[in-house]
Image (cartoon, helix red, strand yellow):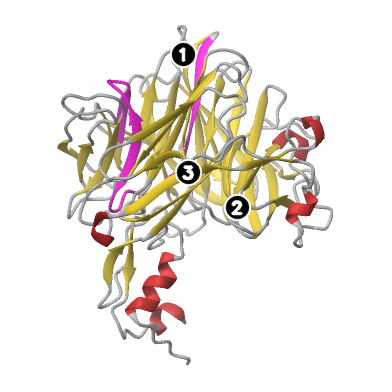
Amino acid sequence: MKRTMMSLIGVTVALAAVSGVAAVTGPAGGAPDAPRGSTRLPVQRSALLCPAPTSSEVGDTTYTAFAPKGAAAGADGGKGTAQLLPAGTVREDGGADKGKGKKNPKGGKGGGADSAAGQTIAPRDTKPVAPLRQAGRPVTATTDRPDAPALVGTADGALAPGWTVQQTTAVAAGAGRGLLGLGCTTPDTTFWFPGVSTATDRQDYVHLTNPDSTPAVVDLELRGKDGALGGSAGEDLSVPPHTTVPVLLSTLTSAPTTNASLHVVAREGRVGAAVQASDGKLGSDWLPAAADPSPSVVLPGIPKDATSVRLVALAPGESDADLKVQLATPTGMITPAGLENLHLKSGMTTAVDLKDLTKGEAGSLVLTPSDSGSKVPVAAAVRVTRGKGAKQDMAFIPATRPVEKRATAVDNRGKDSTLSLVAPEKGKDAKVKVTASAGSGGGTPVTKTYTVKGGTSADITPPRPPGLKGSYALTVEPEPGSGPVYAARMLARPQGGVPAFTVQTLPDDRGSVLVPTAGQDLSVLTN
């Protein structure tokens, strides 16, 4: 057997090349066992991508950037940089097809820039957006431009671990009205989006952003209740360097489908991906990618006043999945009436309307295998609606990873935030420290500790910094010995009688990485 030896310096360089991603773990599991002699160190470089926020003439967008303080919050004596730069945009000539991505006639084998020649719209300016120069205090930037570009950002040094950016857009009127919130995403090669739609009452765009200096080639696959939808329209899409491509999902299939799942695969390069969904009746919001498919998934933070909850799930592998569906409430786990078992056929999307599931109590969905020995992975998301009649708004909650070390939610203002914490395993209480940072314009950080009983979910009014001016960040950190915990944050900002809101899940920020000590035998890791 070949045995590989690496020095600490070599390992650090290799792992630092992975932008912002440290020890990769299963979305439903805890942290992996540390290799003997390894040391946990902060990452040295992170990348984030923010899609174009809105094309509405009455939309206002705020970008909020933050990096937490702490022992694992950086190196280099506290020095570092973090900023976002505008990206170009690719559209069909004149936008006649409403934003369908341009297919590379060469099959995506290089030549990405040439394939988009004459169709790349350069950003109007190249000034950095929300540059961050110190940890512990948020920085904000705003725009009301309907042509605001996508943003490509990097952070290094002390600001790389836990660097978080949120874009929040309020659209006052029109088909895209509502509150749209999204934690800017890290680049990757594969994404799952259960809950998309190609129906006539929805316009869903997937925004693909390439952070790198070489073209990316992407395949888009839609799956409905009977399996794959459409033909080859979503194959070999070219995303030129430092550019974003919005693709209208209904152009990929001739079969309008209300409940579908989207699989995004970058065959060359890597991209950031997020879906912007707009419903003529229910408003609009971002649908982030779900956590990597796993046998058990958790969807935290369903509002207590939800008037409608729709679960969309699929088993993307070659085997069917049978799931136990439970709602974690403040008093324990309950099984929704009539949903003792959920069967997912392999490769097919299943949707279940859970109506007003929470009935006035905080809740989080927990999906586990009916057979405890099953290893069939599943992906899932819920669409949540608040309000009634013409005064409704919707948001999406995808399955998320647990908070292992730390997670952060930014752009909290005043009393508009609700923090949801769920400890899904009975007998394993979660104890978490929640820190409210200084405000972007002033204020004093404050920390509180909360305990969530195993098998329950809790909605918390988070601590607010004394003397707050501007917006602030919330950082969630499990205490030593805590049971598994998942988190989400809801922003509620009513507009014109509509209970406008958005929900962001809080996966672990993966701000640190396990690095083997100098001279350690890495054959256990590399073979």
Question: Does the residue at mark 3 contact the one at mark 1 (Cβ under 8 Å)?
Answer: no
- Mark 3 against mark 1, which lies toward the viewer? 3
Distance from label 2 to label 1 (Cα)? 33 Å
- The magenta stretch spans residue 405: yes
**If you read the primary sequence from the N terminus, does the residue marked by circle 3 or circle 2 appear first?**
3
> Residue tagged by mark 2?
316
- What residue is shown at x 62% (from left), y 45% (from top)? 208
Q: Which residues are magenta?
A: 391-420
The quadrant in which residue 493 appears is top left
Q: Secondary structure at mark 2?
A: loop
Where's residue 222, x and y in %?
Answer: 69, 44
Asked if residue 135 shows in the view, the reply is: yes
Asked if residue 314 shows in the view, the reply is: no
Question: Could you tell me the amino acid type at mark 1?
Answer: Gly
- Mark 2 against mark 1, which lies toward the viewer? 1
Question: Could you tell me the amino acid type at mark 2?
Answer: Pro
Q: Secondary structure at mark 1?
A: strand
> Residue tagged by mark 1?
387
Looking at the image, residue 91 sits to the left or right of residue 524; the answer is right
Where's residue 210, x and y in %?
Answer: 61, 51
- What residue is shown at x 27% (from left), y 28% (from top)? 441
The quadrant in which residue 521 appears is bottom left
**If you read the primary sequence from the N terminus, does the residue marked by circle 3 or circle 1 appear first?**
3
Residues 133 and 519: in front is: 133
Looking at the image, residue 379 sits to the left or right of residue 220; the answer is left
Question: Could you tell me the amino acid type at mark 3?
Answer: Leu
- What residue is shown at x 61% (from left), y 58% (from top)? 213
- Mark 3 against mark 2, which lies toward the viewer? 3
> Residue tagged by mark 3?
84
